[in-house]
Amino acid sequence: MVQIGINGFYSASVALVAFVKLFDITHTGDSGVVVVQKGLSWCKGGCRGAGRWRVMDPLCGVDKAHVAGSISVWIEGLVSKADNGKPCRSPTYFHAVEVPKITISAYVDRINKYARCSKSALVTATIYLCRVFAKHPEIPVVHKTIHRLLIAAVTVAAKFCDDFHLLNLAYAKIGGVTVKEMWRLEVYFLNLLDFKLFVTEEEYHDAVEKYFSSSDDLLTDK
């Protein structure tokens, strides 16, 4: 069920070209750190996970279940504020016919357990959701939409961030939708983002600080 990222929806060659254009790499230090003038800094080792080189993630050492739990708290807060129980006059592609029986917390736990995505992908999925919520108020953040929005965001983020990701067949099973629906949700979500998937270092660190604090005061919508 694992598919190498280079064969996924987002071409590794395109990502490499974008990286070369966006970052001005100067030299590799003796410590193994690639020094850049702007953008992300990369380190040799340092963080857990596969691969030799990786971003110096501020979530290194933070349990992935904590990250997933933080997403649940944030999402549940948004839904409780927005969902008044009234029927939507203009259903979107993300609307389910009925409210899924699985709770938001259990759904996020399921994604975290079976999707095999990195913590960075979960953070990036959160950033993508924030972008969609801000740019598309016509899509309500309610119980009938949030499950499909979540699985679409994680699918897109995992394919963009991780070297290895699952096939859409697996994401569909995890998300409780058909494979055809999964493909459509992915494309619709990408369109909502205008296919702009790049996340700056500042955006990433801001999201970690705002939503994924290691303190007991988890994930309040500031």
Image: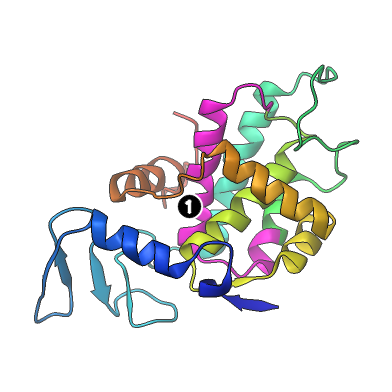
- Outermost residue to the right: 98
Q: What's under tag 1, amino acid-wise?
A: Val
**Measuring 49% from the left and 31% from the top, which residue is drawn there?**
221
x 66%, y 36%: residue? 76
Does the magenta portion include 112? yes
Quarter where residue 9 is shown: bottom right
Q: Which residue is mark 1?
A: 123
Residue 64 in the image: above or below residue 7? above
Where is residue 19? Give x, y as percent: 30, 61
Residue pictured at 73% horizontal, 30% vertical: 142
Q: Main secondary structure of the magenta part?
A: helix
Q: Which residues are magenta?
A: 111-140
Q: Nearer the viewer, residue 185 or 218?
A: 185
Q: Is residue 35 left or right of residue 128?
A: left
Placement of the N terminus among the 4 image quadrants = bottom right
Residue 178 screen position, x and y as percent = 85, 56
Q: Is residue 71 left or right of residue 182?
A: left
Q: Is residue 18 visible?
A: yes
Residue positioned 52% across, 45% down in the render: 126
